[in-house]
Amino acid sequence: MTMPSALGRDDRLVGTLHRRPALRVSDIRPKLRNTALLGMKSLCGDGAYDAHGRFLGDISDIVIDLESGRVAYALVTAHGFLGIGRKWFAIPWRLVTVDRVYQRCVINATLERLIDAPRLDGDPLPRMADAGWATEVHAYFACPPYWA
C-alpha cells in the first residue's frame, strides 16, 4: 500500500472554487415535528464556503462554550500551497449557516475578510478562551458576541 503524496492530499483543493460536494441524505427523520438534525461531527473535515460558493478552508472543529452550552466558533483551517502555511481562524458561529441541501458550512464573510481576521497561532483553545481576543474577533467580524 502506498502513502499519498503531499500533492495528492492537496489535489482535492484544486478547482474547488465552484465545486459542489455530494449531497448527503440521512435516513433518520424526526417523527414529532418538521425538524432536520445534523451531527456536528459530520461537519468537521468538510469544506467551508462563502455565500458565493467559493472555498474558504476546512472546518477543523466546532467549539462550544461549556458554561453556556452555546456553540461559540467554527474553527476553520486555510491551507497554503501544498499544505504549507496552514492558518487557523475562529469564525463566530453567528456568521455560519448550514446549507441544508449540501449540508456544509457557509460563512457570511469573504475570503479577503477571512485572510485579515485575527489568527490563532499554536494551540487555539486557550487563545479562544481569552476574553480580550474573543471581543476583538467579534468586533472584527461586526457581530455580537455569543455570550451577549
Image: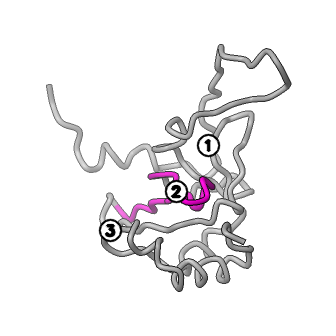
Tell us which disc is closer to us: 1 or 3.
3
* Residue pointed to by mark 3: 123
Q: Secondary structure at mark 1?
A: loop
The amino acid beneath tag 3 is Asp
Q: Amino acid at mark 2?
A: Leu
Provide the secondary structure element on which disc 2 rests. loop
Separation (CA) of disc 1 from disc 2 = 35 Å
Image coordinates for residue 103, horizontal then vertical, percent: 66, 36
In the rendered image of this protein, does residue 128 appear above or below residue 9? below
Q: Is residue 136 magenta?
A: no
Q: Which mark is residue 66?
A: 2
Q: Position of residue 68 (x, y in %)?
A: 61, 58
Identify residue type, mark 1.
Answer: Arg
Residue at 23% in and 38% down = 4
Residue 1 is drawn in which quadrant? top left
The residue pinned by badge 1 equals 19
Q: Is residue 110 left or right of residue 82?
A: right
Instruction: Specify whether 71 is left or right of 7.
Output: right
Q: List the single residue furthest toward the right.
A: 34
Q: Main secondary structure of the magenta part?
A: strand
Q: Is residue 68 above or below residue 41?
A: below
Choose mark 3 or mark 2, whichever is in front. Answer: 2
Residue found 63% across the figure and 42% down from its top: 104
The residue carrying pointer 2 sits among few (fewer than 14), some (14 to 19) or many (20 or more) residues within 10 Å by Cα, namely few
Residue furthest left in the image: 1
Magenta stretch?
59-81
Dot 3 or dot 2: first in sequence order is: 2
How many labels sit on residues?
A: 3
